[in-house]
Image (spheres, rainbow, N blue to C red):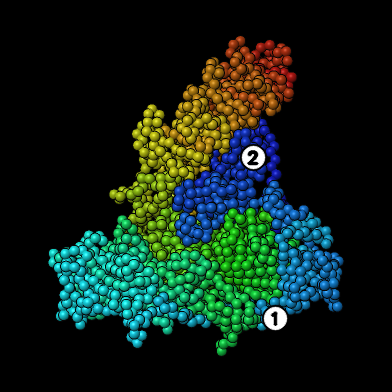
């Protein structure tokens, strides 16, 4: 199949990557930067900049954003409130240099006032599209914190620059990395798995039990150390340092990206003609063999040939089926190698075998020059293709050639074994011959049953006691017992003399006895059992008497155990075994048994004494010894007349021996085994079985019945078979675990099957023991009864395997085969050799193996999921010499684009070199497009490093290859591989030889996945992964595109469309079958049809999940089969999932009976793992407005087999068809919008989902909309919903709901939509949301839910909310919060959020619900919005919150440490972006929206040791994080019409630290701002340096009124501090200087200025100022260096007073005050003043601020006596300060740098007047802003003034006519343009050059000037060489 070359399309997608390391062999990439030009342009005079989309007038330089303006932090609508971001300067430390590679973080740009900083600040773990390696780490970290505490989170070496930079080059949403992201992204993200030495991935016992699927490898793999040039050198140096440096040159195990491409040699023809070619032998000499360029040679060497190397520059042709073994240290192919084989596959048909030898590095020199490749050190045992071509066809894909692997259709079982009997061990003995009369047969047993009397010649009673015989009862009685040595004695000498005993044989003694104690009641407990002491219990002894001179008499004694002695005057049986060794039998003349040690006065009765060799009853039948391995397991057929325990035995004979008891049940007598007096869990029935019966691969069934008494606690137990094995040491096998049972259960049957494996290869008969759990010394030990104990042969191993004939067409006798695993682990795969191939009548063939194998599942038992058999022999072989290392050979096609390689039908054995880069069994290494290449039908066996690795190669076919016994990944596809067809390959039995310590740096082969897929661009069809050490298929898409040597060449791959993925199977993988992670294709196209689709997946018998979908966005799973997995499919952190046309089975009975005894091979390998068909989320993971918006859609799915809890899942805590994740319930309720259609759940319990368990996870309100009613237990509904069985979930639906199993309820005929209200956590504990259906008047009261972990999370501002969720059908409703008394209440805030519309028709929607709020008295309730702010009455810290997600210590009450001895609140901090916070009442913020508030709080700051913090600097800008600020965060709807998505808007720096600040004292955080509103607001005190701790007191947030008479507050610094003052931009030092102001007052100084506009500043509340009002501004100002008040030169000019206003998107800058006169006060203070007419855009602005710009930034700026007030309208007298008594107040020049003004003596010789001088034009003059509201058409005014004109020497000058001063009214902002009206002096008086001249003119207001928005008075238009002197200027209304 042909596919286009995708390489170039990848290159297009990567354009713009911020990396210039380009893979030139594939494509050229260009990086695009951003130009940034900053031009300083200043605003002159009163020009206004209006930022309403574009600049109006001249552009100002951008003031810094250090001012409390609105900064938006936009988040994709997450409900888990976003955590805060690092801002500009977060990483800046003064004096510290940036690390190489650090990048300017997003958001760190210079800000214009009001510009939005978009910050995606995620909550628990960033609900974002793209960039998810960051979220994954945060959430994984949260999971670890929640599970094991903060200390469990390990920071790895991942915080390298290449990790933190460029991780999100192509993110598809507006969100960015947060500080939490950055911290968390450094946790466990070095490679694909954290290097955690405490957690062995193959030994989960050493890992934290977080449940199946808590994949500790989910952190984003970096697979890319060495991504920077500096690191390249380090990598190369590392390889060189660790290699054997035998030769110079570049090692190909190092970096290869600098080596050029190889091409076919120019000296070779396009096609070779090998007709008549010479033999290779013609060039064979004593060293390397070279096939010359342009020459074809034919291979003609002998059966065995060894050469010094083979370099094919021309062509080497190996004839078809040519047999030879060639040993060579290397093969280089620059020309062509051709060989083929068409024989049946068999080791007998091996043709060409190439053995790569040696362990010395070899050098490769290209025949024609290649950049960077002269020469190359290619290491040991290379088979290198560089520019050349392979044409190896050992398995042509033609009709009738068969396949390389196929499913096993059926098995032919071997019969059970029949080992020869061993006398005395597995068969009964016979007695030895009679010594004196051989014709007499010695009996096997001696019985004294006293039926016919007593032989008193052998029976004695001991001195003094009396033996008597009771003929009626047939018993022997002993009386008159007075001594402990009295009792029964049996002289055994006569029997042993005639019939000798067999040495070392076991003899059984059985005695039927009754002890009668006259002092006790019948049935009473004996003294032996009461006292439980050896001295009080009878003993059976044996005396052996030697011949004279041959020894002495000695005794053996066995105590009758209290547990075996019957009650008083009741019969019981005592049984024991005896043996005689050589010493016992040599020179022995007499033997006596005696029974003694009775209590004096007791009467003894004996009914029987039996001595015997064990009979056949005590052994398995010799004719079929392996059918049933347990002898007398039912206690019904024992020796000793049916009462002896043999062959059962006790491991603690001093405590108990097995006893046979009997009972009558339903009229039938039943015998059973009894054990009591236990003191250990292993005290049980024990026996041995015949080890010769354990044939490898055979299956046995175990069963028994058990019950217990004596204790009440429940007990579990397992069946254990243990003993020494041939190869595995001493093994404790546990083939059967039995479920917990109680004494009340009575008899309980336990059974199961086990398969004999190498753990049962015992060297002797193993011991069987039953081991209990749940018992210890404190609980006590129960008494056990056992019955029907059985180990019975069930089936033999597979001797033959039936397969499809056409598939096995080339499989021959004596070929090797590989059978994939049948269990949960790939290690259980098996190998065999074909002995015979026979035809069956059905057309199939049977493959008979030389040695039977363990039975496996075939298609006959498990259709569609039987195991596979693969032929692993090939006739053409390439083998790495076994030199005792794991370094075999390797075949590599290297940098050879455009050449089609054919490698088909080759066996690769011992290839690959463990943990060496680019030393893989087969590798296509950066060859680009190799269309026509076929790597097919090969066998890769026992590879030391991978099977086939495809790196940077496109358009190859990888088909029908078999990999078995592999180290590392089997099939590997790097990020650049594309358009490769991967079809019908089989990966099996991957091992764990590589670990995190010896892996290749940057790669993750220690996971050993069947298919490791890093590229989305390849196609996978019909492949099988059976036995991955971790996963079968691992599909992971990275955020970086790493090319050759892991150099970054592009951005994210996650959003790329994936290739075809269908018909693949995964089984027997130790973790997941399919691990599919980070598939975000949806974010590129936003098209539900252009999303990842996985078709027809089969996953079965995987130890964890069948399918594990992690961060799969809008993925579709269409058709599939899942069975016998811990979880069928787990959906984790994935939204928009479709699961359609699937069959999902639980553990099948077949597999349950098959599982191995090893716990790691069983499902529920951990006791915490639940067993589930679908493991789904309960909360949406991504909540952006462009995200999928739903959780799961399930259609046409059948779930079954999850209801056999006790029978199949004994080790599982629960089994459910559907389960919910326990670690993503941040919302404390279910919002994972889910719908089912045509779903069948076959569960005998009626359970679909366990709502009780889900509720414990945090999901009390599950809703699954049932589209077609298929979930209805009555099967009567056409639609409905499955919901949690809570009244508040069902109460509005009347009788439509019915309770079902698992705490759920089915509501027929409803379709449920959902909305959620997120509220304050504290004070709402008893609140409920009352929802009323207005039509039916039915109501429900919905409780709130919270996620509860600990105090840290409960008070976390981004997490600790209470949620009230309502799921309703369409209708009309009201919703109201009520307390426990039913009163209407408000929970501080209620964030309303609606889910996406339901998949069904008719759910509630946003317009259906009316929300009712209680009445609010805003004047009282909103007077101070901070709760618990005053320390005087503070007794707790609530409702104060915090924003730290780390540590255990949060807000603490500190009694006595507050101001005045009150109780303060302390907060322990680590990071600057964290702080103490509190929610605001949203009803108050609604009521007070747009009104000004004043924030005040007092704070002390200390270091970690509690000492005053010395690193607080309030003079640094807020984003430098050197001092605390107050920030308000509000939640805003992206679309208020849907209310589905919210984001965070952060209003920063609304309050700051007042100066002066003393670190030993309380600091005052203060500021004023305009109150915003939204569904939720909270303020936070944050941004002090890292590790600074807070102590807070006296916090308040109160209304701030506007004062028209005093708009500036603290203008003369009357508070002795900088209250209300702050800085405008930059790291200014702001100081209050006492006594340095005018007349000894205070002054405010700003220093360390870096920009001309950076000065002191104050935000103003001017809401009481109306449009058209005039505001008068005045201040006194000076600079540290004298300035020129009449210059615009940035190095000389003086300060002005500027007013900035912001209203919406309109920003205005007004130069509202000037220094007019060059007459400063005596102490140097200039007067700045002006009049500003308030505009409509400035009326009630969002922000108003004054500052003092323009002075040289190297100068300090001083201000004092700052005032601003409204000039009340006075239309009678329009001119302010007309007589200049306030000097130049309100007057200013017409042009700053074109004239000057001086205050002079007034016209009457006193007072003041103004002189205009140094004028450069007649138009230069004096002006004043008038009140335009007074200019009403027709109104009349008179203008009065006094003027003088002087020359440069101040001498008077005469003027005439137009040369004399006039008054001009300038109208601006007029409808028809500016209006100029000039008025001449109406007084007809001669001009007095030496005196003051009166001026008077009268005018009527014209329509034109009355229409103007601004009117100014100008006095100018006098000859430029003259000075104008002005006094007493008035414009008065004519009354």
Task: Name the spot of residue 1246 as percent of width and height, x first.
Answer: 37, 70
Question: 762 left or right of 233?
Answer: left
Q: Nearer the viewer, residue 721 or 1732?
A: 721
User: Image height check: is 852 above or below 156?
Assistant: below
Query: Between disc 1 and disc 2, whose residue precedes?
Result: 2
Question: 291 left or right of 948?
Answer: right
Name which quarter of the figure residue 622 lies in: bottom left
Task: Name the spot of residue 712 as percent of width and height, x first.
Answer: 27, 62
Q: Are marks 1 and 2 in contact (CB under 8 Å)?
A: no
Q: Say which quadrant the N terminus sits in.
A: bottom right
Q: SS class of the residue under badge 1?
A: loop
Q: Which residue is mark 1?
A: 343
> Which residue is located at x 31 percent, y 72 percent?
589
> Which residue is located at x 35 percent, y 87 percent?
439
Of circles 1 and 2, the one toward us is: 1
> Which residue is located at x 28 percent, y 75 percent?
492
Hey, which residue is sitting farthest top in the picture? Answer: 1805
Task: Name the spot of residue 1370 as percent of width and height, x first.
Answer: 41, 62
Q: Which residue is mark 2?
A: 98
Name which quarter of the figure residue 1304 lies in: bottom left
């Amino acid at each position: 199949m042909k596919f286009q070359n995708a390489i170039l399309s990848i290159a297009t997608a990567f354009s713009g990557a911020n990396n210039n390391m380009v893979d030139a062999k594939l494509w050229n990439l260009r990086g695009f930067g951003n130009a940034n030009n900053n031009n300083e342009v200043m605003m002159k005079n009163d020009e206004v900049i209006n930022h309403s989309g574009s600049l109006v007038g001249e552009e100002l330089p951008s003031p810094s954003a250090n001012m409390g303006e609105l900064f938006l932090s936009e988040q994709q609508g997450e409900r888990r409130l976003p955590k805060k971001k690092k801002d500009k300067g977060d990483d800046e430390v003064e004096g510290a240099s940036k690390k190489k590679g650090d990048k300017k973080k997003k958001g760190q740009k210079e800000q214009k006032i009001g510009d939005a900083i978009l910050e995606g600040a995620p909550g628990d773990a960033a609900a974002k599209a793209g960039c998810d390696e960051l979220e994954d780490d945060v959430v994984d970290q949260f999971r670890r914190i929640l599970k094991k505490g903060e200390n469990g989170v390990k920071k790895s070496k991942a915080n390298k620059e290449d990790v933190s930079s460029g991780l999100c080059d192509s993110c598809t949403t507006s969100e960015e990395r947060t500080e939490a992201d950055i911290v968390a992204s450094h946790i466990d993200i070095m490679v694909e798995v954290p290097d955690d030495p405490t957690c062995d991935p193959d030994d989960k016992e050493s890992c934290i039990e977080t449940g199946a699927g808590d994949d500790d490898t989910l952190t984003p793999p970096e697979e890319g150390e060495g991504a920077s040039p500096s690191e390249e050198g380090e990598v190369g140096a590392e390889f060189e340092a660790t290699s054997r440096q035998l030769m110079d040159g570049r090692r190909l195990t190092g970096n290869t990206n600098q080596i050029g491409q190889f091409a076919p040699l120019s000296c070779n023809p396009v096609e070779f003609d090998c007709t008549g070619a010479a033999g290779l032998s013609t060039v064979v000499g004593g060293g390397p063999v070279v096939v010359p360029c342009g020459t074809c040679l034919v291979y003609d060497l002998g059966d065995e040939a060894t050469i010094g190397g083979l370099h094919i520059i021309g062509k080497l042709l190996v004839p078809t089926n040519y047999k030879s073994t060639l040993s060579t240290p290397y093969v280089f192919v620059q020309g062509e190698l051709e060989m083929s084989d068409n024989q049946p596959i068999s080791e007998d048909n091996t043709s060409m075998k190439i053995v790569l030898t040696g362990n010395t590095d070899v050098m490769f020199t290209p025949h024609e020059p290649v950049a960077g490749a002269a020469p190359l050190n290619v290491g040991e045992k290379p088979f290198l293709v560089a520019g050349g071509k392979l044409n190896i066809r050992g398995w042509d894909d033609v009709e009738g050639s068969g396949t390389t692997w196929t499913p096993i259709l059926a098995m032919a079982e071997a019969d059970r074994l029949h080992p020869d009997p061993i006398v005395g061990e597995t068969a009964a003995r016979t007695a030895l011959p009679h010594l004196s009369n051989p014709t007499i047969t010695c009996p096997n047993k001696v019985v004294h049953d006293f039926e016919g009397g007593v032989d008193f010649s052998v029976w004695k009673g001991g001195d003094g006691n009396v033996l008597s015989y009771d003929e009626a009862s047939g018993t022997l009685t002993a009386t008159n017992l007075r001594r402990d040595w009295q009792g029964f004695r049996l002289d055994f000498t006569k029997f042993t003399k005639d019939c000798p005993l067999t040495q070392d044989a076991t003899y059984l003694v059985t005695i039927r006895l009754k002890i009668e104690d006259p002092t006790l009641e019948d049935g009473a407990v004996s003294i032996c059992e009461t006292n439980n002491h050896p001295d009080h219990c009878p003993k059976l002894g044996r005396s052996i008497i030697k011949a004279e001179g041959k020894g002495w008499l000695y005794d053996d004694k066995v105590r009758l155990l209290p547990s075996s002695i019957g009650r008083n005057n009741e019969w019981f049986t005592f049984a024991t075994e005896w043996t005689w060794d050589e010493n016992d039998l040599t020179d022995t003349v007499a033997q006596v048994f005696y029974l003694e040690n009775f209590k004096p006065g007791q009467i003894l009765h004996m009914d029987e004494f039996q001595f015997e060799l064990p009979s056949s009853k005590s052994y398995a039948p010799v004719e079929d010894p392996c059918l049933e391995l347990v002898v007398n397991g039912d206690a019904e057929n024992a020796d000793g007349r049916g009462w002896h325990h043999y062959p059962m035995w006790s491991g603690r004979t001093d405590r108990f021996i097995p006893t046979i008891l009997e009972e009558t049940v339903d009229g039938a007598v039943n015998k059973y085994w009894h054990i009591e007096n236990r003191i250990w869990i292993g005290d049980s029935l024990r026996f041995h079985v015949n080890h010769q019966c354990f044939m490898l691969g055979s299956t046995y069934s175990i069963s028994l019945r058990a019950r217990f008494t004596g204790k009440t606690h429940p007990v579990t137990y397992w069946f254990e078979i243990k003993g020494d094995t041939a190869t595995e040491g001493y093994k404790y096998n546990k083939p059967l675990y039995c479920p917990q049972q109680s004494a009340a259960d009575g008899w309980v049957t336990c059974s199961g099957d086990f398969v004999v494996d190498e753990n049962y290869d015992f060297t002797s008969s193993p011991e069987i023991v039953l081991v209990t759990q749940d018992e210890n010394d404190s609980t006590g030990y129960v008494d056990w009864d056992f019955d029907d104990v059985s180990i019975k042969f069930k089936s033999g191993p597979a001797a033959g395997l039936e397969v499809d004939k056409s598939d096995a067409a080339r499989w021959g006798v004596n070929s090797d085969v590989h059978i994939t695993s049948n269990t949960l682990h790939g290690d259980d795969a098996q190998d065999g050799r074909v002995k015979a191939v026979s035809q069956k009548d059905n057309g199939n063939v049977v493959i008979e193996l030389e040695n039977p194998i363990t039975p496996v599942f075939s298609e006959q038992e498990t259709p569609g999921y039987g195991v596979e058999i693969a032929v692993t022999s090939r006739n053409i072989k390439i083998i790495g010499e076994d030199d005792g290392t794991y370094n075999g050979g390797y075949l590599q096609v290297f940098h050879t684009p455009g050449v089609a390689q054919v490698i088909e039908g080759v066996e690769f054995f011992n290839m690959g070199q463990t943990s060496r880069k680019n030393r893989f069994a087969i590798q296509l290494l950066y060859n680009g497009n190799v269309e026509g290449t076929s790597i097919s039908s090969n066998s890769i066996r026992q590879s030391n490093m991978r099977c086939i690795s495809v790196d940077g190669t496109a358009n190859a076919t990888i088909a029908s290859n078999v990999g078995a016994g592999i180290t590392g990944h089997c099939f590997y596809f790097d990020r650049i591989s594309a358009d490769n067809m991967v079809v019908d390959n089989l990966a099996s039995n991957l091992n764990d030889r590589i670990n995190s310590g010896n892996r290749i740096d940057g790669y993750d082969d220690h996971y050993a996945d069947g298919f490791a897929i890093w590229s989305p661009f390849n196609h996978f069809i019909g492949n099988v992964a059976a036995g991955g050490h971790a996963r079968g298929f691992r599909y992971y898409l990275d955020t970086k595109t790493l090319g050759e040597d892991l150099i970054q060449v592009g951005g994210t791959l996650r959003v790329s469309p994936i290739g075809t993925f269908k018909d693949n199977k995964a089984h027997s993988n130790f973790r997941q079958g399919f691990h599919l992670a980070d598939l975000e294709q949806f974010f590129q196209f936003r098209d539900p049809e252009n999303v990842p689709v996985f078709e027809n997946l089969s996953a079965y018998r995987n130890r964890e999940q069948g399918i594990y979908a992690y961060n799969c966005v809008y993925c579709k799973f269409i058709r599939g089969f899942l069975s016998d997995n811990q979880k069928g499919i787990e959906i984790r952190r994935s939204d928009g999932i479709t699961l359609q046309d699937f069959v999902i089975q639980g553990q099948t009975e077949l597999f349950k009976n098959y599982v191995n005894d090893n716990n790691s091979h069983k499902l529920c390998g951990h006791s915490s793992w639940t067993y589930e068909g679908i493991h789904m989320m309960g909360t949406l993971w991504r909540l952006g407005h462009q995200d999928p918006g739903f959780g799961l859609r399930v259609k046409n799915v059948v779930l079954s087999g999850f209801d056999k809890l006790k029978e199949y899942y004994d080790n599982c805590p629960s089994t459910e068809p559907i389960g919910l994740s326990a670690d993503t319930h941040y919302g404390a309720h279910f919002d994972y919008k889910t719908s089912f259609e045509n779903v069948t759940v076959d569960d005998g319990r009626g359970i679909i989902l366990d709502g009780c368990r889900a509720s414990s996870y945090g999901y009390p309100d599950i809703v699954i909309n049932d589209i077609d009613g298929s979930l209805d237990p009555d099967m009567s509904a056409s639609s409905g919903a499955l919901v949690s069985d809570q009244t508040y979930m069902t109460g509005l639906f009347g009788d439509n709901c019915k309770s079902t199993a698992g705490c759920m309820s089915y509501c027929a005929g409803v379709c449920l939509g959902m909305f959620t209200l997120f509220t304050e956590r504290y004070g709402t504990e008893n609140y409920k949301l009352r929802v009323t259906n207005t039509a039916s008047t039915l109501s429900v009261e919905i409780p709130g839910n919270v996620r509860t972990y600990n105090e840290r999370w409960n008070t976390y501002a981004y997490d600790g909310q209470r949620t009230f969720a309502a799921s309703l059908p369409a209708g009309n409703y009201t919703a109201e919060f009520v307390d426990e008394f039913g009163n209407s209440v408000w929970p501080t805030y209620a964030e309303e959020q609606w889910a996406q519309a339901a998949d069904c028709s008719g759910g509630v929607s946003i317009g259906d619900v009316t929300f009712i709020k209680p009445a609010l008295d805003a004047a009282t309730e909103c007077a101070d919005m901070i709760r618990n702010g005053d320390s005087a009455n503070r007794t707790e810290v609530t409702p104060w919150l915090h924003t730290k997600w780390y540590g255990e210590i949060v807000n603490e009450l500190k009694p006595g440490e507050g101001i005045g001895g009150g109780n303060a609140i302390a907060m322990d901090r680590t990071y600057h972006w964290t702080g103490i916070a509190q929610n605001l009442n949203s009803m108050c913020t609604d009521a007070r929206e747009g009104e000004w508030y004043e924030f005040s709080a007092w704070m002390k700051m200390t270091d970690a040791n509690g000492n005053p913090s010395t690193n607080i600097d309030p003079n640094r800008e807020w984003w430098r994080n050197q001092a605390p600020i107050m920030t308000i965060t509000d939640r805003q709807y992206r679309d208020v019409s849907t209310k589905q998505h919210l984001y965070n808007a952060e209003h920063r720096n609304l309050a700051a630290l007042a100066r002066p600040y003393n670190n030993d004292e309380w600091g005052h955080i203060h500021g004023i701002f305009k109150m915003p509103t939204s569904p939720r607001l909270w303020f936070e005190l944050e941004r002090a340096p890292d590790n600074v701790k807070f102590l807070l007191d006296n916090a308040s947030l109160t209304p701030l009124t506007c004062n028209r008479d005093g708009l500036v507050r603290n203008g003369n610094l009357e508070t002795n501090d900088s209250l209300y003052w702050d800085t405008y931009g930059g790291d200014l030092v702001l100081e209050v200087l006492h006594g340095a102001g005018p007349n000894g007052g205070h002054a405010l100084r700003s220093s360390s200025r870096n920009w001309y506009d950076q000065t002191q500043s104050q935000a103003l509340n001017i809401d009481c100022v109306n449009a058209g009002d005039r505001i008068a501004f005045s201040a006194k100002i000076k600079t540290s260096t004298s300035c020129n008040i009449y210059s615009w030169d940035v190095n000389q000019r003086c300060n002005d007073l500027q007013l900035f206003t912001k209203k919406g998107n309109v920003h205005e800058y007004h130069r509202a005050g000037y220094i007019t006169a060059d007459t400063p006060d005596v102490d140097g203070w200039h007067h700045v003043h002006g009049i500003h007419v308030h505009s409509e855009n400035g009326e009630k602005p969002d922000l108003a601020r004054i500052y003092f710009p323009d002075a040289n930034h190297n100068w300090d700026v001083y201000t004092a006596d700052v005032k601003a007030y409204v000039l009340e309208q006075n239309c009678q007298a329009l001119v302010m300060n007309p007589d200049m008594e306030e000097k130049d107040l309100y007057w200013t020049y017409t042009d700053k740098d074109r004239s000057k003004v001086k205050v002079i003596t007034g016209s009457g010789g006193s007072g003041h007047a103004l002189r205009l001088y140094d004028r450069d034009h007649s138009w230069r003059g004096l002006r004043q802003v008038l009140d335009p509201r007074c200019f009403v058409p027709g109104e009349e005014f008179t203008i009065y003034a006094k003027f003088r004109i002087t020359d440069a020497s101040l001498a008077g000058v005469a003027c005439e006519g137009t040369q004399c001063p006039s008054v001009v009214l300038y109208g601006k902002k007029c409808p028809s343009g500016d209006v100029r009206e000039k008025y001449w002096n109406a007084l007809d008086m001669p001009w007095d050059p030496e005196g003051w001249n009166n001026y008077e003119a009268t005018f009527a207001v014209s329509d034109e000037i009355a229409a103007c928005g601004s009117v100014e008075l100008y006095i100018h238009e006098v000859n430029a060489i003259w000075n104008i002197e002005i006094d007493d200027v008035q414009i008065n209304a004519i009354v």
